Image: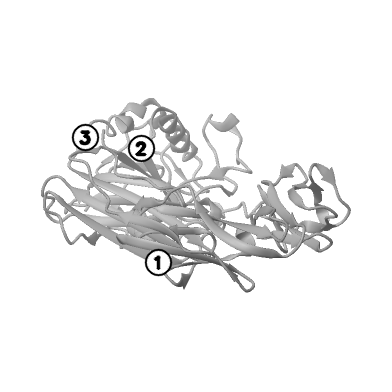
Amino acid sequence: MKTKNILKCLVAVCALFVYSCSSDSDGDGGTTPAPGGGGSAITSITVTASSNSVEVGNAVTFTVKGNDGTDVTSSSTISINNADITGSSFTASAPGTYTVKATYEQLTSVQLFIEVTAGPITALRVESATTSIKVGDTADFTVIGTDALGNEYTITSDASLSVNGTAITGNRFMATQMGDLTVVATKDAITSDDFMVAVTGETAPGTFAKNALIEDYTGTWCGWCPRVAYAIELVEAQSDRVFVNAVHSGDPMANSYGATLDNIYVTSGYPTAVLNRDVDWTYPEPSNVAQATNLATGTTTSGLSINSLLKGNQLDVYVSTAFAANAPGAKLVVMILEDGIVASQANYTSYYGAADPISQFVHNHTLRHSITNVLGDAIPNIAGGTKNEEVFSIPVPSTVNNANEMSILALIVAADGKVLNVNGAHVGVDKDFQAN
């Protein structure tokens, strides 16, 4: 553990004390944190329907919400098949698939599809793109309804699905053990035939692609911190094997998990960026991109696969660790990050147009929660040729502004705390073991 200076101790006691901030020219300047600033702003909208499947002559009511949860229906324009409607309700006079979009100010929603049937549904069936998946994978199911005239409609949103007799939320299911899945759909008093999915084991490669981690210790008050943010953008433009964890201090995005890391790895002020929990990223970071990307080359003897599934307010996370050689004392870290947080950012650099502050700065890779100890939990099987599977199920952390912007970051750390390998993905994206 590095020795903390007096300034760091003051930071830990009170975020209102003066923070050190390395200068853009010599890395030894300072600044005082301003209040975090920013606040939520609507950057995307979503349109939902009171029902996604109705009979001819029945009305559907639409709701439009911003990504911050604000209901903006009354201020939005809703279109059906590219024709604007008045108000937020629609009644179809003919069966078919209707395309719904909403606009609010300069924002347009993702399309929503409404199925209008000629009459009551008389039969159901379940479909999927696959009938075989691996442990840790997800399967997406589609429910097809047939009316009395033989017309077929996709009515997934209005049907209920169960897997092995247990109801699931939505139409996605993540397998956490081998075996056969029996999937059934119901709507009203109608039940589909069984749909079967086989779940097989996950195989790890003999060696693993070596990825790297940047942990960016930052704050909205830190005027020199945009320099590191810009350097991270340069790294991401060159490599998809370098992952980022933005650890905030002294602003509304700060939390206890970040404070634990901050107290270990920040000894000389802000900004500080640490590579693989091992060495500081050399100043000036934008001129030393290769220091980060070079760490994400070649192969190593440990790796991770991850997947996750958001079910309403519940988040399921699957992480598998595998070892081609012994890794005494290895630990697992699993964290939740959030992208797209808009907050004012102090800026003393020439980057981002030299604006100070940057009023609508988008903060990505922000540490929100650690499912494990942020320094790692012991991995049971660390011998060469072994594999471990962990499944975590937690409510979406209250610190997350927008659950749709969450990502999972998983690390294998050695007994000395240094990162052996890392993998990450947006929630809902499956990342298998990576061979070089």
Question: Crowdedness of circle 1 by 10 Å Cα count: few (<14), some, many (20+)?
Answer: some
Q: Looking at the picture, which amino acid does disc 2 mark?
A: Val
Residue density around tag 3, few if under 14, some if 14–19, many if 20 or more, within 10 Å: some
Relative to 244, is 200 on the left or the right?
left
Q: Do the residues bearing badges 1 and 2 touch, measured as CB atoms within 8 Å?
A: no
| Cα–Cα span, label 1 and label 2 | 26 Å
Mark 2 crowd level (few <14, some 14–19, many ≥20, 10 Å Cα): many
Q: Is residue 312 left or right of residue 248?
A: right
Q: Identify the image quadrant of the C terminus.
A: top left
Q: Indicate which disc, 1 or 2, sits on the residue closer to the N terminus.
A: 2
**Image coords of residue 1 (percent x, y):** 21, 53
In the image, is residue 346 above or below residue 88? above
Residue at the (20%, 59%) spot, across then down: 379
Q: Tell me the quarter of the picture where residue 237 sits.
A: top left
Rendering quarter of residue 299: top left
Q: Secondary structure at mark 3?
A: strand
Residue receiving disc 3:
299
Q: CA distance from mark 3 to mark 2?
A: 14 Å
Kind of residue at badge 3: Thr
Mark number for residue 393? 1
Q: Earlier in the sequence, mark 1 or mark 3?
A: 3
Residue 263 in sight here: no
**Residue 242 has which mark?**
2
Secondary element under disc 1, as helix, strand or loop, is strand
Is residue 323 found left or right of 410 in the rendered image?
A: left
For this rendering, which residue is in front, 155 or 329? 155
Tag 3 near tag 2, CB within 8 Å: no
| Vertical comparison of 133 with 392: above or below | above
Looking at the rendered image, the disc whose residue lies closer to the viewer, 1 or 2, is 1
The CA distance from mark 1 to mark 3 is 31 Å
Provide the secondary structure element on which disc 2 rests: strand
